[in-house]
Structure formats: C-alpha cells, structure tokens
Amino acid sequence: MIPYGRQDITQDDIDAVVKVLQSDFLTQGPEVPRFEQSLAGLVGARHAVAVNSATSALHIACLALGLGEGDWLWTTPITFVASANCGLYCGAKVDFVDIDPRSYNICPVALERKLKAAEESGNLPKVVVAVHLCGQPCDLEAIHALSRRYGFKLIEDASHAVGGKYRDEYIGNCRYSDVTIFSFHPVKIITTAEGGMALTNDDQLAASMDRLRSHGITRDAGAMTHAPDGPWYYQQIGLGFNYRMTELQAALGSAQLARLDKYVAARHALADRYNSLLASLPLTLPWQHPDSYSGMHLYVIRLKLEKIKSSHLQVFESLRRQGIGVNLHYIPVHTQPYYQRHSPASGALPEAEAYYAEAISLPLFATMTHAQQDEVVAALTSALHQ
Ligand SMILES: *Cc1c(COP(=O)(O)O)cnc(C)c1O
C-alpha cells in the first residue's frame, strides 16, 4: 500500500536521538529550548513553546487567551477534530464557519456575515481557530482585520503549514494572529513522533503557555506571590498539565528542521507533477493562492461526479483495492455525533458538505518516488473510468 503520508528518518535523526539517550537529560534538558529557538528563529516569532502534541498546543493557547465557560470558539468544519475540541476542553461552546469553495479554508465572507449576526445577538466569539488546510495559508489579512473589528483572538492551526509562506514570510511569525500552532505527528511535514509547538510574539501569552504545559508552576520570582523561600522553591500559580515534549523528541525535531525547506520543495515538485499528470481527468485539482507558498501537507482532489459513472465511495474503494492509501481530510466536524449532541452547528454549512462528498487525499510525502506517483495516477485513471 502506498500510504497517503509518511515520515522520512535519516541517519542524522537517529544519531541525534541516540546522543540524547546517552546524555544526562531525557526530559527538561537543553534540546527542547534549542528546538524552540531554532523554529522560532526560522519563522520569525518571538517565543515558541514545545509540547507533546498540537492538540495540547491548541488547548494551552485557548486557556492562555482566556477562553472559558460561556465563551464561543469558532473554527472551520473541514479540519481534524482537535481544532474544535480545544474549545470544549475549556468549557466554551464551539460553532463553525463555512469554507471557501476554492481554497477549502475558512471563508472570510462567511465569517464576516456570521460575526455581524453574532454582534446583534451578543454572541461574538472570543477565539477563532483558522486552519491552513493542506498547508495553504488562510486569507490572514482579511481574518486579522475582522479580529480587530470584532475583538476576537486568532489562533492559526498550522499543523499542515510548517515551512509554508504567506506573502513571502514563513507561517508561524504571528504577524496576523495571537498564536500559531504546529504539529509534528509523523504524517505531517516534519516529525517528533508526537509533538507540537505554540508560537507567539506576546510575552505574557508565552509565559502563560509555558506554565500551562508544566502544572501551572513558575520558577520566575517576579511571577510569585512572595519572594522564594529558597533555591528549591517554585510556585503553582495556576492549574496546568504535563504537556512537556521530551529531549528525544526535540532532538529529532531539530534534526528534521534542518531539512524543512527541502521537504516542502519536494512536496511542491510532486504536487506540480500531479497537476500535469491529472490535468485531463474529470477532477478539480488543488487551487493555489498566488500570494502564498503552501506547506503542501496534502494533495486533495475533488471528483467531478457529474462527469463520471462511479460514486465517490466507489472511486475511493477502487483506489484502496489497488493499493493506494487514499484518505479523506476531513469528515466535517459538525457531523460528528459528539458535536451533534453537545455543540451543534448553528447554521447550514453547504460548502463543507459539498467538499466532503467529492474530496479524496492522494498520497503525498517528501520521499515519494515518481514510480509510486505514476502508480497512483494509473490507479486513479482506472477508478474514474470503471
Ligand atoms: C494533526 C492535526 C492536529 C493535531 O495534531 P497532533 O499533534 O496529532 O495533536 C490538529 N489540527 C490539524 C489541522 C491537524 O492536521
């Protein structure tokens, strides 16, 4: 089976992890701050807080932004459930904004319409999570302008977009947002096995997220209620978690980060090749915003169902039968039973549902060969003509 995504582990990665195993620190040593500083430095953010997953990063970002009971978090329905669950973790309510039919990202026009209505009914969101689906940056300038006008905080869920750029600047610099989140799950662009990071330019948010990842504890005398009792002293000044990243993960992350640009370039070359090989098939191919450089995490095609005899399910099953590990990113979150029971969408989301009825993610990973890609194209051609 050709998987839809997979990691690339080199001898450098293995050496970096082994070196940590032989060192004094398996956790809370020098590797985590080194990884944080390298990534923050690369993308141009002031602070980075490494954690054990992007899900944890979303959680502590929401808490640091003050999201709580009675508040609203809005996001796109076409995302992994984690982008919405972080709101529920904080006791907030979650609602969804429909996607743009071309980029598949949260639609700024739909967002503005919904904000206007929410202002009238006094239900404005405290936090909006904008997801850079497939690695393609959202319309950050438009969403940022709305955040100023309507007073919400903006989190970029850039789980798909590390290495991507918006107007020639790396995603993660938080020029338009309060916090940006990355994921280092093995299917993503670079990996730490499990892992994530929250980046921000705000000193207080960074300090708050730093405490939240480690039990709400501070060792900063300035943040304590009284002077330290002695050199052993720390204070718990909030309620946090153990969301820390290990030294092994951070060393792997730093080794992977050295190849980030190469990985994203390889993904672009493969995507360009898909674009030309698939051009004559009855498909809508991914649209690329001219102002941005996608992280190219996923290559999503949409079937032109009116032009083919098979159903979406039949094409998908045929591809799997032929050994192609296709996937579907994502099942609209508002259709999940948990959301239908606990936080149902307040309005119709027709673009998200139309997307779900047609979308298929083709295999794409940095080390994919042309032969593997040709195999995918042949299988898809046969699936569409059956
Ligand atoms: C993978 C992913 C997450 C969660 O990442 P983890 O590191 O596995 O917690 C969140 N949001 C999106 C959009 C993702 O793709």
Image (cartoon, rainbow, N blue to C red):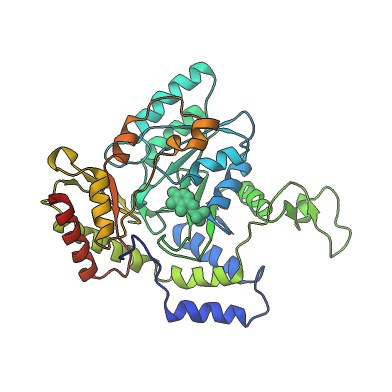
The N terminus - image quarter: bottom left
Task: Residue lying at the far left in this picture: please name it.
Answer: 280
At x 63% / y 60%, what residue is drawn? 244
At x 52% / y 26%, what residue is drawn? 124
Position of 166 with respect to 318 (left or right) is right
Q: Which percent across, then down, holds residue 246?
A: 61, 67
Number of numbered callouts drawn: 0
Q: Which percent across, then down, holds residue 373?
A: 22, 65
Q: Is residue 114 above or below residue 264?
A: above
Q: Which percent across, then down, holds residue 209?
A: 63, 50
Whether residue 166 is visible, yes or no, is no
Task: Residue lying at the far top in this picture: please name it.
Answer: 120
Q: Nearer the viewer, residue 191 or 312?
A: 312
Whether residue 354 is visible, yes or no, is yes
Q: Nearer the viewer, residue 259 or 201?
A: 259
Q: Is residue 384 above or below residue 345?
A: below
Q: Is residue 128 above or below residue 121?
A: below
Position of 302 with respect to 253 (left or right) is left
At x 80% / y 53%, what residue is drawn? 235
Q: Which percent across, then down, holds residue 150?
A: 49, 27
Task: Residue lying at the far right in this picture: please name it.
Answer: 229
Position of 95 with respect to 295 (left or right) is right
Q: Is residue 10 above or below residue 72?
A: below
Name the image quarter holding residue 258.
Answer: bottom left
Position of 325 with respect to 77 (left or right) is left
